[in-house]
Amino acid sequence: MIGVLALPQRWALLPDVDPRRLVRCPWLTYGLVQTTVAIDRLRAWFGRGGLDAQPPASSLVRYIGDTEMAAAVRDALDRIAPAARDYVIRHAIVIGVGWSSAGWTGGRLPDHRVCIVVSGRSRDATCIRGIALHEMAHTWLESVEESPALSSVEDAVDLRGAVERRARILAAEWSAR
Ligand SMILES: [Zn+2]
């Protein structure tokens, strides 16, 4: 089930938002709301007046690493849903490695930020953008601040599979924008 949610479904997800305003949100897709974490983040974004605010510029993303990759990362950020873009800019730091650097050591991440690492090994902007979209989808959909409790190796594999499926669905939606 991939695609834009029907309006009643969107309204049910966001009971505090006037349904007529949700018509202005073509980016509110199934992929964006696959987890309760993501729905909570979306509600918080609407609650802060995100719909009426100017979308944050992709240039505001905290990016460190290989400069050759920075444009592809910002291009990815331009394609993701405004609420997710706001979340990534507020809570994440993107690290690009593999294009011109083999690796490096730095200090602690500022402000307990979530770390998104993107490989530039391909040296291909489209490929790098796709990796960034996929990792930003993980950032939006999952609570990476908390380690999930896993009771067995099988659970770990199943969880990983579900997590990967979700990120692939959302990254594919964003990539098509
Ligand atoms: Zn993944």
Image (cartoon, rainbow, N blue to C red):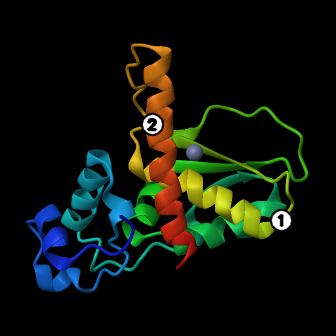
At label 2, the amino acid type is Val
Rendering quarter of residue 129: bottom right
What residue is at 73 percent from the left and 61 percent from the top?
128
Q: State which tag comes first along the sequence, 1 or 2.
A: 1
Secondary structure under badge 1? Answer: loop
Question: Within the image, what quadrant is residue 126 found in?
Answer: bottom right
From the image, tell me which residue sits under label 1.
Answer: 124
Is 41 positioned to the left or the right of 15 in the image? right
Which residue lies at the image location 41% right of the left edge and 71% below the top edge? 82
Q: Is residue 98 above or below residue 122?
A: above
Q: Pick whichever, 24 or 61, lies toward us.
A: 24
In space, the residues marked 1 and 2 are separated at their CA atoms by 27 Å
Q: Position of residue 10 (x, y in %)?
A: 19, 70
Residue 91 visible in the snapshot: no
Instruction: Count residues near mark 2 (Cα–Cα under 10 Å), then give few for <14, some for 14-19, many for 20+.
Output: few
Image vertical order of residue 142 relative to residue 120, above or below: above
Task: Tell me if residue 117 comes above or below residue 31 in the rendering.
Answer: above
Answer above or below: position of 176 versus 20: above
Three-letter residue code for mark 1: Asp
> Along the line of sight, which residue is nearer the eye, 11 or 46?
11
Disc 2, SS = loop
In which quadrant of the rendered image does the N terminus lie? bottom left
| The one of 174 and 164 positioned closer to us in this rendering | 164
Image depth: mark 1 or mark 2 in front: 1
Image x and y of residue 140, in percent: 42, 52
What residue does disc 2 label?
144
**Image coords of residue 133 (percent x, y):** 58, 60
From the viewer's perspective, tell me whether residue 87 is left or right of residue 19. right
Residue drawn at point x = 44 percent, y = 32 percent = 159
